[in-house]
Image (tube, rainbow, N blue to C red):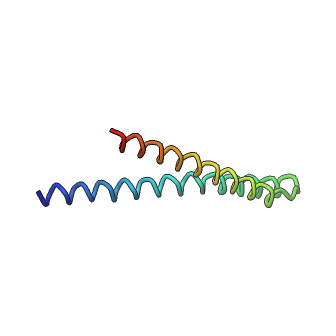
Amino acid sequence: MRGGKFLKNNREVFRSLAMITQIGISVLAPVILCVALGYWLDQKFGWHTTVVLVILGILAGARNAWILLNQMVQDDEKKKKK
């Protein structure tokens, strides 16, 4: 009995860690890409777009996190109904 509960708790912990990692990557990826693009545009053409692209990257990352969290909540609600 006790071993089954331990495995169930571990699965939940690993699932939570996977979700946190997925959200972190989905937030950081657009920010890093926008910073890199802004830096490259600044160096190549002399444009000052890094700040604008950082803000755009932050907004895109927030949108990604919002979508992922909504999907996770919907999945949890479906599992609870079953």
Q: Which quarter of the image is occupied by the C terminus?
A: top left
| 61 or 68, nearer to the observer | 68
- How many labels, in total? 0
Q: Give coordinates of residue 6: x percent, y percent.
A: 20, 60
Q: Which quarter of the image is occupied by the N terminus?
A: bottom left
Q: Give coordinates of residue 38: x percent, y percent.
A: 77, 55
Residue farthest to the front, as pictured = 81
Residue farthest to the right, as pictured = 46
Is residue 35 toward the left or the right of residue 16 in the image?
right
Residue occupying image coordinates x 40% and y 40%? 78
| 76 or 29, nearer to the observer | 76
| 54 or 11, nearer to the observer | 11
Q: Give coordinates of residue 49: x percent, y percent.
A: 83, 56
Residue occupying image coordinates x 34% and y 56%? 14
Is residue 77 toward the left or the right of residue 41 in the image?
left
Residue occupying image coordinates x 40% and y 58%? 17
Q: Give coordinates of residue 45: x percent, y percent.
A: 87, 52
Quadrant for residue 47, please give it: bottom right
Quadrant for residue 9, please give it: bottom left
Residue occupying image coordinates x 58% and y 52%? 65
Is residue 29 toward the left or the right of residue 46 in the image?
left
